[in-house]
Amino acid sequence: MGRWMRTVPSLLEKKTFWTVVLILSTAFAFFLNLYGMERGLLPITSHLFYIPIVIAAYWFPRNGITFTVGIAMGYLAMVYLFQYPHLESLTQATAYFYVFVAIGVIVSSLSSTQKEQERRYHGLFDYSEAGVFLVINLRAGPVIEEVNQKGAQILGYRPGELTGTPLLDLFVVGTERDRILERATRGGSLSDFECHLRRKNGSVLHGLLSAGPLPGRRTVFTLVDITARKKAEEDLRSSQKQYVNALDSMMDGIFLVDRAGRIVLLNSTFGRWLSHIGRQENVVGLDVREAVPCTSGGFYDAIHSVFEKGEDSETILDFSFRGEDHFFDTHFIPVVAGGDVTRVMVIMRDITRARNLEREKKRAYQQIEKNIEQFAILGDHIRNPVQVILGLAELEGGPFAEKIRTQVHEIEKTVSQLDRGWVESEKIREFIRKYYGVGEDVKDQN
């Protein structure tokens, strides 16, 4: 089963496969139409040309219109060659010619727009700073359906190697595997779940996992590698002698606070941050509220809570400085000596750039939603002139009115199918709407 899960999706994404299908379906359509002319089945067999036309317009939008016109002209020439001077067949073939071209133009236009939207989505998906895994929940268990480059890189794989891999096989700890199966793969969600996963080379990764449900029995996971951070935290707890060197080597801002709320130690990164806000003097020995004026009362309360409970905690510190918003992911870690919490280590990671990038992503997703709404209107723009054609045919009457009515219904049917299926996969739109919190929910808030 895993082999088919890898082979079939990759095969369907290859243009060479669809080129072969296009050639075979075109030849098959012409052959059956020749047979249909001999048997009087031309009105039925003519519909077979919809298959190669839609394939060409969808998978090859740049050349789809040219290919469609070629098929339509070939069909028209074939009918004129074998049915002339049979007026009814010639008229019918001419009507089909225009229908074929119209469908090719519509599908090619929608396909070009869709692929542009997909390129934008995959740009955000592939270049995300976190690993993103799209998982489908089968009876046998959750299976990885798609993974971005960062996610594969974190685990030491190439992106295509993880497709079809059972998700639970990556987890090292059984209890973590059970929680993922219980919560994330049954319509629930996870947030900042610390877990251990096995890389391709056998080493263990300490990750921070979040998950959210998607339609179609799918779940999206985001994974951040915190192995380095966890190792640093463990090293800091185990050896106070290496505090200064370890702290100064880290890119995060770090300082220690005693029970009186005074700063007793800080690393060079945090010192540079303080100098940027105008605090040039040495802050060791100062109360944390005086040394770091941009903090709020909740920041000091969080430090006090760690002293009281002896448990790690974290928060997001945000403030404005010189007209710019800044965000720091802040962790509070107790330092225990003699069974008591004597210090609290505060680790501050600057996530301002990531927050700003997230805002830009949401703006992009909102624009995609607006484009989706605009293309929903496109179907009406196509239907209106078709209805005019139908009205004129009804007024004129005659032997061709019923044929025109039939073709108009075929166009209506095709446009309705395009309305429902212009997005290749519903998971893309639902991913944007439900996981990133934009779409209809955002509109309601506005």
Image (spheres, rainbow, N blue to C red):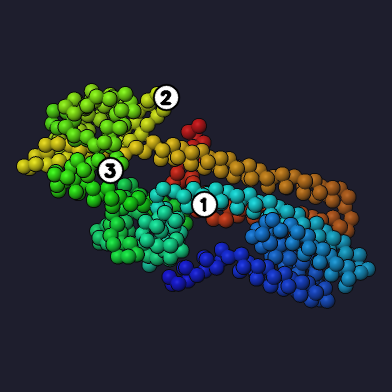
> Label 1: which residue?
122
Amino acid at pointer 2: Gly
What's the distance in space between the residues labelled 2 and 1, CA to CA?
33 Å
Q: Neighbour class for label 2 at 10 Å: few (<14), some, many (≥20)? A: few
Q: What numbered label is drawn on residue 250?
A: 3
* Disc 2, SS: loop
Q: At which x and y percent is residue 297?
A: 25, 26
Residue at point 50% right, 53% down? 427
Q: Amino acid at mark 3?
A: Met
Q: Secondary structure at mark 1?
A: helix
Q: At x 44% / y 46%, what residue is drawn?
A: 435
User: 62 above or below 248?
Assistant: below
Disc 1 to disc 3, C-alpha distance: 32 Å
- Identify the image quadrant of residue 137: bottom left
Image position of 99 (left or right of 425): right
The reply, left or right, for residue 169 in relation to residue 9 is: left
Q: Position of residue 57 (x, y in %)?
A: 69, 58
